[in-house]
Amino acid sequence: MNESNDSPPTRGWDTYWQGARSSGAYAADGVTHPAVATFWDLALAEVISSQRSIRILDIATGSGAVVERLTQHASGGNFEVTCVDFSAAAIESVRGRFPEVTGLVADANSIPLDDSTFDLVTSQFGIEYAGPAALSEATRLLAPGGNLILMMHVRPGVIYQECAAALDAIRRTRQSEFVPRALTFFEAGFAAVRGADRSSYDKAALELNPSIQELEAILSEHGEHVAGETVVRLYSDVQKIHSDIQNYEPDEVLGWLRAMDKELAEYERRMQSMCDSARDADGFAGICEHIHAQGLLVDQSEPLMIGDKALPIGWILRATRRSQAA
């Protein structure tokens, strides 16, 4: 993941961390599921309670889910927490919530920090996006005797399943040309309201119909909650505006649709990167081997299951760097 902070993928994640968050099952059964918080609480309590002072690094910190757990466990002790993410918006958000934390905007593949600096290195659904080089960075930064705790995307899994559905829904929405055709439709519609000939409006309506039918098919197949309800909101908002078009400002409606066109493209990239980052059993085994080859002892490597669900939520990897004496 060697993109600069001005690259399209980074801009897409900046938008995400600024507030374009999913609200469907991904939020309920994904990164905010109680099982995830419980895992971190138990793992962090085990590591932190045994040390009077500790230097902690969270890689690909995102929304700061791990930082939140860390700051709760580290309160009252001599702890230093640093979070790293290539999204400036993510770091700004985390620093706004946790001003005592050090924030660093950097590529996980090349973190500008000294070797063996941290006693604990963590990452939740983030480091796997960057690949083996980021894993090597995590081990490079880990001090002798230090602990590595990672939670990573699993395929097949609860989050993967939902991201794959969202990717299909958003990709098909874009391929249907719903937004560009809605733009043409409303441009002609506003002109008709002002007294222009209706022929362009009628033609645009006919061209929009197949796109409407495709969105209906997407919602029928995946349900209204797919992609954080982005598709159903787009579908219903266009209907609502059309039904009362004379009471809307053309510039606002057309500006909204142009912004949605860009956001859908960014959303598709995010879902694709999430799906691509998920590891199957063989891929996870390869990660464990890579960690072991970097001089760490793998203490735990297994899927994290939640409740009675058949699919796991993610992979759990815990490892310890051998002490210099060993």
Image (cartoon, rainbow, N blue to C red):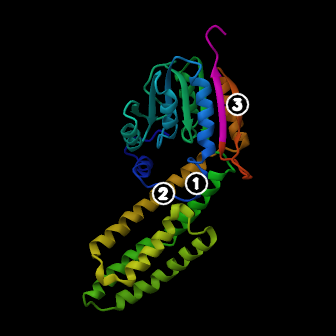
Please state which amino acid type lies under the numbered disc 1.
Ala
Please state which amino acid type lies under the numbered disc 2.
Tyr
Q: Earlier in the sequence, mark 1 or mark 3?
A: 1
Query: Which numbered mark, 1 or 3, is in the foreground of this view?
Result: 1
User: Residue 289, image x and y in percent?
Assistant: 69, 29
Q: Which mark is residue 300?
A: 3
Q: Give the side of residue 274 with respect to residue 318, left or right.
A: left
Residue ranking furthest to the left:
194
Given residues 290 and 40, the one toward you in this image is: 40
User: Residue 261, image x and y in percent?
Assistant: 41, 65
Residue ranking furthest to the top:
325
CB within 8 Å, label 3 to label 2: no
Secondary element type, mark 3 = strand
Magenta stretch, residue numbers: 315-326
Q: Which residue is mark 2?
A: 267
Residue 109 in view (yes/no): no
Please state which amino acid type lies under the numbered disc 3.
Gln
3D distance between C-alphas at marks 2 and 1: 19 Å
Secondary element type, mark 2 = helix
Residue 94 in view (yes/no): yes
3D distance between C-alphas at marks 3 and 2: 33 Å
Q: Earlier in the sequence, mark 3 or mark 2?
A: 2
Secondary element type, mark 1 = helix
Is residue 229 positioned above or below 17 on the image? below
Q: Which mark is residue 28?
A: 1
